[in-house]
Image (spheres, rainbow, N blue to C red):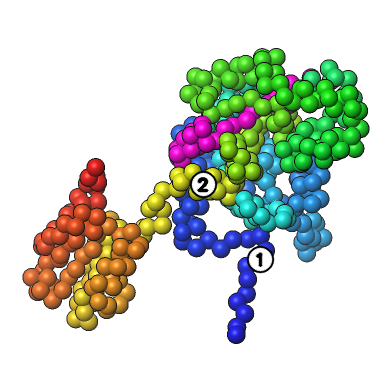
């Protein structure tokens, strides 16, 4: 028996049904991004590892990146995220760009992780960022974009919530507890790990980084205070803006949200499944005001988020929000082949209809009409055209609408107009 060569571990084959979902996610990202005035861009799939070493954090650089030397001996990585590449691009043209910069992208990324549900080594991700403004209102705009996306794909506030915090507020509270400045980055990472560890393991991790039992108790109290945001003028302005933008019901304050990457400097946020069945975050992001300087540019404020394709797909499947007709044929019309004597006429008809601006599928061989009709039904084709010897003799075509069952025979020269009208006609309620 022959052995079929398998795909590389942690990658996915995108058969048409999976590709249709990916395209749907991309098209929705485009629609929502452009509705807020964001422009599409992209960056190289390969970057130097030093770009990420600048600010992404040890775990991403040392454990999760695919790193290899090129022929010149330089260490190259498949991009594990996009924010450092984006900041490098902005830094390179910092003096020429018109601010505020609003950009978005959707593309592939790679991380050397253990493949599991909702996580693979190769994934696709929507990234959207705003540069040049440092206000709570601009932070709220990014969160509103995320909420608009959730609404666009059918997810309700009862199904998904965006959890928000401000690292500056947390830093002030940590300082008030007497925690030394050099310990605070480790404490932020400890807080970020809370939802990922068993309670006893999380406490042990806190003791390991140097927290006393008294400090641990104070921090537990801090992390359960859902009204803490009222101590932050920025968060008060942030939530007021979300009210105006009409998405406040999607957003909730959570003092445990700090985000694990080192470059975040202000408001941070994550979207989660409210029922907790889909355990990984749907999306995450926040403010990063120092990253541009870390890659060689002048200081410039930025805020953005990223959403991977896998977790949002799991959530849409769970709540039955994926459109039923995603995998239908891109051509809604099928020209059938009646018999050997009409095959060239069928091919010519299909070509003429395409020239008229229609998307047309022509059956590629002679087959029983029942088989061709079944093919049309299974691939979501809406209209079937039959041109048998009688129709060919009279320069006519027979058109059947598979959705309504209506069938009509008309002159061939009128086919394009009739088909266009049928496709534009709204479906019956």
Question: Which range of residues does the magenta coloring cover?
Answer: 148-172
- Near-viewer residue (57 or 298): 57
Image mark for residue 367: none
Residue drawn at 10 percent across, 74 percent down: 390
Q: CA distance from mark 1 to mark 2?
A: 27 Å
Count of picture labels: 2
* Horizontal side, residue 113 vs residue 416: left or right: right
Look at the image and tell me in which quarter the C terminus lies: top left
Which label's residue is closer to the chain start, 1 or 2?
A: 1
Residue 378 at least partly seen: yes
Residue 285 x/y as whole percent: 65, 35
Q: Is residue 126 above or below residue 356?
A: above
- Near-viewer residue (235 or 129): 235
Q: Which residue appears farthest toward the left when viewing the image?
A: 394
Local packing at callout 1 (Cα closer than 10 Å; few below 14, some 14-19, many 20+) is: few
Residue 301 at least partly seen: no
Q: Is residue 292 magenta-colored?
A: no
Q: Secondary structure at mark 1?
A: loop
- Near-viewer residue (6 or 157): 157
Look at the image and tell me in which quarter the N terminus lies: bottom right
Q: Is residue 223 above or below residue 236?
A: below
Local packing at callout 2 (Cα closer than 10 Å; few below 14, some 14-19, many 20+) is: few
Question: Mark 1 highlights which residue?
Answer: 8
Question: Mark 2 highlights which residue?
Answer: 318
Q: Secondary structure at mark 2?
A: helix
Residue drawn at 60 percent across, 20 percent down: 238
Residue 407: quadrant of the picture: bottom left
* Horizontal side, residue 375 vs residue 105: left or right: left
Residue 114 x/y as whole percent: 72, 56
Residue 362: quadrant of the picture: bottom left
Residue 396 x/y as whole percent: 12, 66
Q: Is residue 166 magenta-colored?
A: yes
């Amino acid at each position: 028996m022959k052995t079929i060569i398998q795909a590389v571990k942690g990658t996915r084959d995108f058969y048409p049904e999976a590709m249709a979902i990916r395209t749907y996610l991309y098209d929705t990202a485009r629609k929502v991004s452009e509705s807020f005035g964001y422009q599409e861009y992209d960056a190289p799939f390969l970057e130097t590892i030093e770009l990420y070493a600048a600010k992404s954090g040890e775990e991403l650089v040392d454990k999760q990146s695919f790193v290899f030397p090129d022929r010149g001996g330089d260490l190259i990585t498949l991009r594990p995220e996009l924010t450092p590449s984006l900041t490098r691009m902005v830094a390179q043209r910092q003096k020429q760009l018109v601010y505020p910069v609003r950009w978005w992208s959707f593309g592939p990324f790679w991380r050397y992780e253990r493949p599991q549900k909702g996580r693979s080594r190769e994934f696709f991700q929507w990234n959207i960022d705003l540069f040049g403004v440092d206000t709570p209102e601009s932070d709220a705009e990014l969160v509103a974009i995320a909420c608009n996306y959730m609404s666009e794909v059918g997810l309700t506030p009862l199904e998904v919530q965006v959890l928000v915090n401000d690292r500056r507020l947390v830093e002030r509270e940590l300082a008030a507890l007497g925690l030394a400045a050099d310990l605070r980055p480790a404490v932020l990472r400890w807080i970020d790990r809370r939802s990922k560890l068993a309670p006893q393991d999380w406490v042990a991790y806190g003791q390991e980084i140097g927290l006393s039992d008294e400090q641990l108790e104070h921090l537990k109290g801090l992390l359960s205070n859902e009204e803490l945001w009222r101590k932050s003028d920025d968060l008060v302005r942030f939530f007021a803006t979300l009210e105006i933008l009409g998405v406040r019901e999607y957003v909730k304050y959570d003092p445990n949200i700090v985000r694990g990457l080192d470059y975040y400097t202000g408001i941070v946020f994550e979207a989660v499944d409210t029922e907790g069945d889909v355990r990984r975050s749907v999306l995450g992001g926040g403010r990063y005001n120092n990253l541009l300087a870390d890659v060689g540019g002048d200081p410039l404020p930025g805020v953005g988020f990223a959403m991977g394709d896998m977790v949002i797909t799991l959530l849409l499947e769970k709540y039955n929000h994926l459109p039923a007709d995603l995998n239908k044929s891109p051509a809604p019309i099928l020209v059938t082949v009646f018999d050997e004597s009409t095959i060239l006429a069928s091919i010519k008809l299909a070509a003429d209809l395409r020239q008229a601006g229609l998307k047309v599928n022509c059956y590629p061989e002679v087959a029983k009409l029942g088989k061709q009709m079944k093919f049309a039904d299974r691939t979501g084709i809406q209209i079937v055209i039959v041109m048998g010897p009688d129709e060919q003799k009279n320069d006519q075509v027979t058109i059947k609408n598979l959705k309504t069952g209506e069938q009509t025979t008309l002159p061939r020269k009128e086919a394009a107009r009739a088909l266009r009208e049928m496709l534009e006609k709204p479906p019956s309620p």
